[in-house]
């Protein structure tokens, strides 16, 4: 059987983010992040709230924490540093939202190289995510 060198690895699907249900129930993201610090969804919510309030540096910090927590989870799920991270798989959305928020905050503080890396990483992960997040 021929080996397709151009084939993408299968999409990585994260396990359920325990913070997502608490956020959906209206719990404050600070409380969720404190209780479940591995929840990228909680960090994404904090990053979005801080950015909307004009606290760009805080948004950057929250997004970076959630991004790194998400990378850790992706690696545990078998991700090898490249390949799809499907937006349609709801547990992936916290990580993808953090990636978007990190790029947005990086752009706002003039960190253009990081903003570009984040934008490209988001599109490479799943172009649907970039569209859904307005990137």
Image: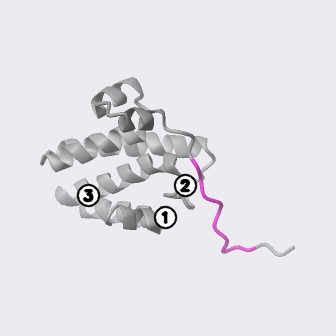
Q: Nearer the viewer, mark 2 or mark 1?
A: 1
**Foreground: 96 or 132?**
132
Mark carried by residue 126: 1
- Residue 23, can we see it? yes
Residue 43, image quadrant: top left
- Residue 65, can we see it? no
State the residue position of label 2. 81
Q: Is residue 98 left or right of residue 6?
A: left
State the residue position of label 3. 104
Q: Position of residue 42 (x, y in %)?
A: 36, 37
Q: CA distance from mark 3 to mark 1?
A: 17 Å
- Indicate yes or no whether the magenta region holds residue 83: no
- Indicate yes or no whether the magenta region holds residue 7: yes
Per the image, label 1 sits on a secondary structure element best described as loop
Dominant secondary structure of the residues highlighted in magenta in the image: loop
Q: Position of residue 108 (x, y in %)?
A: 18, 58
């Amino acid at each position: 059987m021929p080996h397709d060198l151009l084939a993408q690895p299968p999409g990585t699907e994260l396990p359920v983010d325990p913070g997502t249900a608490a956020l959906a129930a209206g719990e404050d993201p600070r409380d969720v992040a404190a209780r479940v610090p591995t929840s990228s969804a909680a960090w994404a919510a904090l990053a979005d709230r801080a950015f909307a309030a004009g606290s760009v540096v805080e948004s950057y910090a929250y997004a970076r924490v959630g991004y790194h927590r998400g990378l850790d989870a992706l690696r545990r799920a078998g991700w090898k540093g490249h390949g799809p991270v499907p937006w349609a798989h709801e547990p992936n959305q916290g990580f993808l939202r953090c990636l978007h928020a990190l790029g947005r905050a990086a752009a706002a503080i003039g960190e253009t190289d990081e903003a570009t890396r984040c934008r490209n990483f988001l599109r490479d992960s799943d172009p649907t995510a970039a569209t859904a997040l307005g990137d």
